[in-house]
Amino acid sequence: MHICIDDYLLDIVQNSFEAASTHVELALDETESKLTCLIRDNGKGMDAEVQKRVLDPFYSDGVKHTKRKVGLGLPFLSQACEACQGTFALHSEVGVGTTVEFSFNLAHLDAPPMGNLVSTFVALLSHPLAKELVIRRTVSTRKGNSTYTLSKEELEEVLGSLSTSGALNLLREYINSQEEEVMTYHVEPKMQSETRRTQQEM
């Protein structure tokens, strides 16, 4: 079951890897009250009919997960976005690739927590099916803004294969330092209930 935002990221990017993508982009842009995510790949893509079916929680192609009778990743993501007044969009073309764009209203009571982005990024960058993955993370608030970019190809040029424990430990330390830097500009969203309470007291 998907509980945190990083669960959705892990699921959708792994979908891209399993669609024979050689290049995947993951972008996360966070403000004081909104997180916008984009995942774009150059995999096999989907036609219009399949795009409709993948949003049905009771549909599974039976190929990617032979023992699974339902596919919950995209349907759960779409519902989670809707529950907190966010957005969801799926664009795909056969032979070209797929783009999934979604956002969460972080100030909404039903917005899921972020989860552990460092562990998620490490898992995705070291995934055995990942050819090239580029991750861009940005935080922009009234305190300022900061961005970092991770490229699997560039990281492997420095660290070597991301399959050894030594390389993975260094990768985790590096990503953690980058995440700590952007989080200095993080501002906790003002929850809608607090806003309503303040308005009622006025």
Image: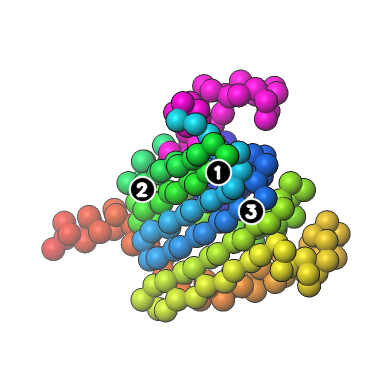
Residue at 78% x, 72% y is 158
Residue at the bottom extreme, as displayed:
144
Name the residue beneath numbered marker 1: 96
Residue 178 in view: yes
Determine contact: label 3, label 1, CB under 8 Å. no
Q: Is residue 31 above or below residue 46?
A: below
Residue 11 in view: no
Does the magenta stretch mainly form a helix, a strand or a loop? loop
Name the residue beneath numbered marker 3: 23
Cα distance in 3D space between marks 1 and 2? 27 Å
Residue at the left extreme, as displayed:
202
Relative side of 36 to 172, left or right = left
Q: Secondary structure at mark 3?
A: strand
In which quadrant of the rendered view does residue 73 lie? top right
Residue at 38% x, 66% y is 32
* Residue 183 drawn at (x, y percent): 52, 71
Sequence-first disc among 3 and 1? 3
Quarter holding the N terminus is top right
Relative side of 170 to 117, left or right = right
Q: Magenta span covers which residues?
A: 49-78
Name the residue beneath numbered marker 2: 86
Category of crowding for the residue at label 2, using alpha-carbon neighbours closer than 10 angstroms: few (below 14), some (14–19), many (at least 20): many
Q: Amino acid at mark 2?
A: Gly
In which quadrant of the rendered view does residue 94 lie? top right
Relative side of 200 to 73, left or right = left
* Residue 195 drawn at (x, y percent): 25, 59
Q: Is residue 10 above or below residue 107?
A: above
Sequence-first disc among 1 and 2? 2
